[in-house]
Amino acid sequence: DTAVSQTPKYLVTQMGNDKSIKCEQNLGHDTMYWYKQDSKKFLKIMFSYNNKELIINETVPNRFSPKSPDKAHLNLHINSLELGDSAVYFCASSPSGRTYNEQFFGPGTRLTVL
Amino acid sequence: QKEVEQDPGPLSVPEGAIVSLNCTYSNSAFQYFMWYRQYSRKGPELLMYTYSSGNKEDGRFTAQVDKSSKYISLFIRDSQPSDSATYLCAMSRISSGSARQLTFGSGTQLTVLP
């Protein structure tokens, strides 16, 4: 019954590799997000999609490419991984039509680049 | 200077204490204010939200917003060991779009000692 799920939970890889993280939500939400949380717990938005359309694209290296095959899925592909990409990546989703923004977060993917 | 500043702690209190967590912000366009709780190795979950200035109470939790001072607080009464977590403040502007971009504080790590 997981609302927002991410795979994998842990990802350890070498510098220069390409990797993907998958996210799925079963809440029926229209909007999905990717966040990066660094070692100091600072959570920063990377991307947001609404109904498969990119609507927020923060200053993120173009090695990061989000893909939304449908409104329940938002995947993150990272090319040429660097040491500084090590962080926890969170997927989130939110419903449309509300005045405030309640975002539901997944459990996170802990990425370690060696 | 970050748009949202939050004392990272760590903060340790005895069980039953009143806890006060605070954030300051610099952008007067922020209108929605939220507190998220994040347990270790988990995703953030929404605790409280408020719109504009004022207080909001939910059980042992009270959220307070002072827009004139650009200062928000979360009070936890009768704190319990299960409240031990990182508390993140978050805020967003009014937007007609479908995605509300959240700006997070860096989080305060709280430990409630039994």
Image (spheres, rainbow, N blue to C red):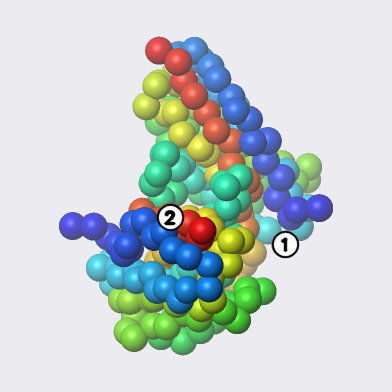
Q: Chain of mark 1?
A: B
Q: Is residue A53 above or below residue A40?
A: below
Outermost residue on the right side: it is B1
Label 2 element class: strand
Q: Is residue B95 visible?
A: yes
Q: Which residue is mark 1?
A: B29
Rate crowding at label 2 as few (under 14), some (14 to 19) or many (20 or more) other CA atoms within 10 Å: some
Quadrant assignment, res A11: bottom left
Where's the C terminus of chain B, which quadrant?
top left
Q: Chain of mark 2?
A: A
- Measure the C-alpha gap from mark 1 to mark 2: 33 Å
Write the residue at 58% across / 61% down: A83
Q: Nearer the viewer, residue A76 or A92?
A: A76
Q: Is residue A31 visible?
A: no
| Residue B111: assigned label | none
Q: Is residue A15 above or below residue A62?
A: above
Quadrant assignment, res B40: top left
Rate crowding at label 1 as few (under 14), some (14 to 19) or many (20 or more) other CA atoms within 10 Å: few
Residue B95: x and y in percent read: 60, 72
Outermost residue on the left side: it is A1
Label 1 element class: loop
Disc number lying in front (1 or 2): 2
Q: Nearer the viewer, residue A4 or A29?
A: A4
Residue B55: x and y in percent read: 58, 38
Write the residue at 57% across / 47% down: A39
Identify the amino acid type marked 2: Arg
Residue B62: x and y in percent read: 52, 33
Side of A51 where B10 appears, left or right:
right
Write the residue at 44% across / 28% down: B84
Q: How many marks?
A: 2
Q: Is residue A27 above or below residue B3?
A: below
| Residue A110: assigned label | 2
